[in-house]
Image (spheres, rainbow, N blue to C red):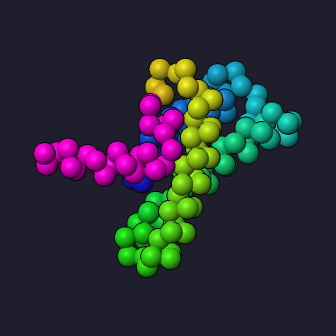
Amino acid sequence: MDVQHFERITAFIEARLTPLFEESTGSERGFAMDDTSRALRALRNAVLEASAVKGLIEKRATADAALRRVIDQSVEHHWDVLRGIARQWEDHGDFRREFKRHAWELDAALAAAPAAAEG
C-alpha cells in the first residue's frame, strides 16, 4: 500500500466535503449544533483519522514480521473506511477506479508494476 493512494482518496473526499462547510456556497452547516452539522464534522473527522497512515507506512519497512502484520491490518482497515466513503461519489467525474479496489488489489498492482517495467 502506498501513501499516494491515501493522499489521492483523501483529496477526492475532501473536495466533496469542503464546499459543504463554506459560507460562500450558502451553507449554514458544519459549525452549528444541529444534527446535519454534527454529522458533517463526524464524517470529516473520520476521513482525517483514516488518512493519517503515513507514519505507519513509513515504519513498516523497519518493523519485524509481527509488527508488520499489525501495520498491514491497520492500513487495510483505514483504506476500507476511506474507500467506503469515497464510493458514495462513484458517479463523480473525478472518481478513480483505484478507489473501488481493496488494499490487497492495490498491493498486487504495485508489485506487478516493476515486473512489467522490467519485462
Residue situated in front as seen by the camera: 4 or 72: 72
Query: Is 106 situated above or below 13?
Result: below
Q: Is residue 92 left or right of residue 46?
A: left
Residue 38 placement: quadrant: top right
Viewer-proximal residue, 32 or 45?
45
* 49 shown above or below 37: below
Q: Is residue 18 visible?
A: no
Taking the spot 85% from the left edge, 40% from the top edge, the residue there is: 33
Per the rendered image, the range of residues in magenta is 96-119
Residue displayed at 81% across by 33% down: 36
Can you say whether 8 is above or below 25 in the image? below
Q: Residue at x 26, y 46 (%)?
A: 113
Question: Percent from the top left, x then y, of residue 110?
Answer: 33, 49
The x and y percentages for residue 115 are 21, 49
Give yes or no for residue 73 being in the magenta stretch.
no
Q: Main secondary structure of the magenta part?
A: helix
Q: In this rendering, is residue 75 above or below 8? A: below
Asked whether, in this view, residue 113 is left or right of residue 85, the answer is left
Is residue 67 toward the left or the right of residue 80 in the image? Answer: left
Residue 34 image point, x, y percent: 86, 36
